Amino acid sequence: MTFTRIAACFALALATPAFAQTKPTPEAFTAAAASSNMLEIRSSQLALEVSEDPAIRAFAEQMIRDHRDAGEKLTEAAASEGVPVPDELAPKHADELDSLADGNKGAFDANYVKTQQLAHAEAVTLFEDYSASGPEGALRAVAGELLPVLQQHKAHADGMTPADATPE
């Protein structure tokens, strides 16, 4: 076997995992999307209880409203495909919410914004991936429909700088 053939086989072996990636399943997408959605709602409800910053409060109200609507659309699409929608946060999201709730109240606004930035970055990636490569159906259509809203939320959160707050 020549060096060129060995190199070609080696390159093919390294590239194979990229081609062997599986499409996301409706169940995995729905579980991740539902948990992310609940985190964004619950952390925003907490923000309404704790924050006195008008910009934070307005953003939190928008998140609650928009993510409740998104949750309803996700639930309808999942039901049409026979996919269960979890009603509990994934452990990772539960830990993030607990950390936010138990954190320094003086730094709450900055920590809330950081939580929203991270949650929306994760959600945008999730919805981009599923709308591009998930199985055809109602869930994929909803992922594509909700993606622009999530991108707007991410841009809004990324541009926020709460007054007099620094993250822990």
Image (cartoon, helix red, strand yellow):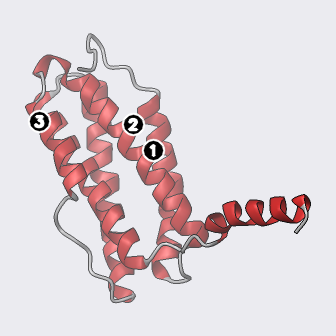
Q: Residue at x 25, y 27 (%)?
A: 111
Q: Quadrant of the C terminus?
A: top left
The answer to whether the residues at label 1 and label 2 have Cβ atoms under 8 Å apart is: yes
* Disc 3 + disc 2, Cβ < 8 Å: no
**Residue neighbourhood size for the residue with mark 1, other residues' Cα within 10 Å, grouped as few (<14), some (14–19), many (≥20):** some
| Other-residue count near label 3 (Cα within 10 Å), few / some / many at <14 / 14–19 / ≥20 | some
Amino acid at pointer 1:
Ala
The answer for how far apart the CA atoms under marks 3 and 1 are is: 21 Å
Q: Is residue 8 left or right of residue 12?
A: right
Residue identifier under label 3: 101
Q: Amino acid at mark 2?
A: Gln
Q: Is residue 63 above or below residue 108?
A: below
Query: Which quarter of the rendered picture does the N terminus lie within?
Result: bottom right
| Residue closest to the far front | 1
Residue at the image point whose x is 64% and y is 64% from the top: 18
Q: Secondary structure at mark 2?
A: helix
Residue 72 drawn above or below residue 59:
below
Sequence order check, earlier mark of 3 and 1: 3
Dot 2 corresponds to which residue?
Answer: 117
List x then y, in percent, for residue 93. Answer: 23, 50
Circle 1 sits in a helix, a strand or a loop, which is it?
helix
Q: Is residue 48 visible?
A: no
Q: In this orientation, which residue lies closer to the viewer: 117 or 1?
A: 1
Left or right of 51, for residue 55: right
Which amino acid, mark 3?
A: Ala
Residue 97: x and y, percent?
18, 43
Q: Which residue is mark 1?
A: 121
Which circle's residue, 3 or 2, is located before the other in the chain?
3
Q: Position of residue 31 (x, y in %)?
A: 31, 68
Identify which residue, 24 or 37, lies in the foreground: 24
Bin the neighbour count of mark 2 within 10 Å (Cα to Cα): few under 14, some 14-19, many 20 and up.
many
